Amino acid sequence: MKVISVAFMLLLGVCIIVGMLETAVVDALLNENQCKEERRIGINACKPVIYGKLPTAECCERVRVSHVECVCPVITPKLAALVDVNRAIKLIQGCGRPVPRHFRCGSITTP
């Protein structure tokens, strides 16, 4: 179960990171507890994605509203190795978000 959670966290992280790149400025810096809660909510909303399902409307909403600053710090090389970046990009585009090229967040760089 922990491996699934880690893999999902990374997939969600990639979705959030790439999905939020067009947000120009975060209104206020979030503290660690707020970031932890934001990640928890996103994981719960997008859990079916890890099992190969398409993101729900709720999951897409989380992808659009989550903060990059809360996700990038947790993307380690070990987590990055578990994610199919191309699949994540397709999922993000399916949520209606453009995907910037060559963006680096943690240990992931988009193609």
Image: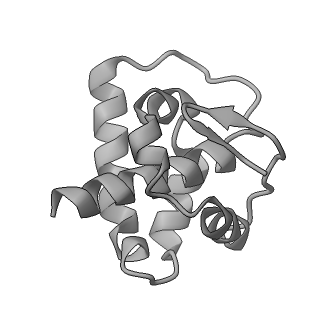
Question: What residue lies at 24% left-to-right and 58% top-to-bottom?
Answer: 3
Residue 90 location, quadrant: bottom right
Residue 21 location, quadrant: top right
Residue 60 on image: x %, y % = 55, 65
Q: Residue furthest right?
A: 101
As drawn, is 31 to the left or to the right of 96?
A: left
Residue 24 on image: x %, y % = 77, 28
Residue 65 on image: x %, y % = 56, 46
As drawn, is 94 to the left or to the right of 111?
A: left
Above or below, comparing residue 106 to residue 16 in the picture: above
Count of numbered circles on the image? 0
- The foreground one among 103 and 32 is 103
Q: Residue furthest left?
A: 1
Question: What residue lies at 36% left-to-right and 58% top-to-bottom?
Answer: 7
- The foreground one among 98 and 30 is 98
- The foreground one among 43 and 57 is 43
Residue 8 on image: x %, y % = 37, 59
Quarter occupied by the N terminus: bottom left
Above or below, comparing residue 85 to residue 72 in the picture: below
Question: What residue lies at 80% left-to-right and 56% top-to-bottom?
Answer: 98
